[in-house]
């Protein structure tokens, strides 16, 4: 995603640069074409027709365009479902340990005790999880698993499901899935099996009320 954004930014900057230094030439070209009239070549007509066909096919959900879009969604869902243990929130490795503990509703003292019990050294409560992992020859996911109680060296109290510090009921389906890195299509399909029609903008509170369960019980359907 970062590379995509940077490439798009570079494209926009180069386009603006080109327009700025060739503005007079472009204006002269369009004035000339306006006077003489546009002579549409076969290549130009074909390019416009193909472009319109792709745009209409994409928005209209017409195969094979819809098939490509669905394949993209299936690949994302497969990766998110089978990628292994997930962090409790997006970019958790960038958080300081104290902020991470607050986000997952664990006392900082318990977090420090748990890490110390596994031989993981922490120089400061404000040190990021990425920094702690690096200093202990680990990766951030190892820290997550230790605190979840899923590490192989021992058992501890698992972390309670959270959604980046927000109450679950206040989030939409898309917001929750993006935060927890869960496939939206998988979640929607699970709800549909239980007779609930959900969209990406559906509120978790409303969906849980439809099933007469709590939001915390609702998110277990996506696991």
Image (spheres, grey):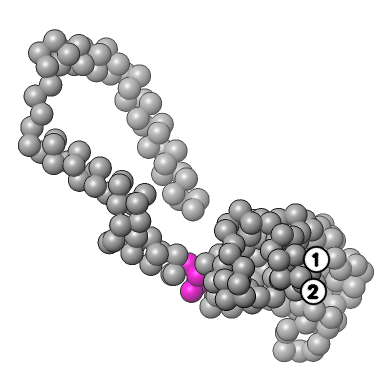
Between 161 and 201, the one lying in front of the other is 201
Quadrant hosting residue 39: top left
Q: Are marks 2 and 1 in contact (CB under 8 Å)?
A: yes
Residue 92 percent across, percent down from the top left: 69, 61
- Quarter of the image containing the C terminus? bottom right
Is residue 79 on the magenta stretch? yes
Instruction: Classify residue 198 by image quadrant.
Output: bottom right
Provide residue 21's location: percent of width, then percent of height: 32, 18
Residue pointed to by mark 2: 159
Numbered disc 1: secondary structure: loop
Q: Residue at x 58, y 64 (%)?
A: 197
Question: Residue sitting at 30 percent across and 47 percent down?
Answer: 56
Q: Which residues are magenta?
A: 76-80
Residue drawn 65% across and 65% down? Answer: 180
Q: Please provide percent x and percent y for residue 65.
A: 31, 58
What secondary structure do most residues of the magenta stretch adopt?
helix
User: What crowding class fits label 1: few (fewer than 14 Cα within 10 Å), some (14-19), or many (20 or more)?
Assistant: some
Residue 145 locus on image (x, y percent): 71, 78
Q: Is residue 24 magenta?
A: no
Q: Which residue is mark 1?
A: 104
Residue drawn 78% across and 82% down? 149
Density class for disc 2 (Cα within 10 Å; few <14, some 14-19, many ≥20) is some
Q: Secondary structure at mark 2?
A: loop
């Amino acid at each position: 995603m970062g590379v995509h954004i940077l490439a798009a930014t570079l494209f926009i900057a180069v386009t603006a640069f080109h327009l700025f230094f060739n503005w007079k030439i472009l204006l002269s070209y369009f004035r000339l074409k306006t006077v003489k009239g546009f002579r549409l070549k076969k290549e130009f007509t074909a390019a416009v027709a193909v472009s319109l066909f792709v745009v209409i096919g994409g928005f209209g959900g017409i195969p094979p365009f819809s098939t490509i879009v669905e394949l993209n969604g299936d690949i994302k869902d497969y990766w998110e479902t089978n990628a292994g243990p997930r962090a409790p929130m997006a970019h958790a490795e960038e958080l300081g340990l104290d902020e991470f503990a607050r986000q997952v509703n664990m006392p900082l003292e318990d977090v420090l005790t748990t890490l110390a019990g596994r031989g993981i050294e922490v120089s400061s409560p404000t040190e990021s999880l990425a920094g702690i992992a690096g200093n202990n020859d680990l990766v951030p996911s190892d820290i997550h698993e230790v605190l979840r109680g899923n590490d192989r060296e021992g058992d501890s109290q698992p972390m309670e499901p959270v959604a980046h510090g927000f109450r679950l009921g206040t989030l939409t389906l898309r917001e929750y899935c993006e935060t927890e890195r869960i496939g939206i299509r998988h979640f929607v399909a699970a709800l549909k099996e239980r007779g609930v029609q959900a969209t990406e903008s559906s509120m978790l509170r409303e969906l849980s009320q439809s099933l007469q369960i709590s939001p915390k019980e609702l998110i277990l359907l996506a696991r």
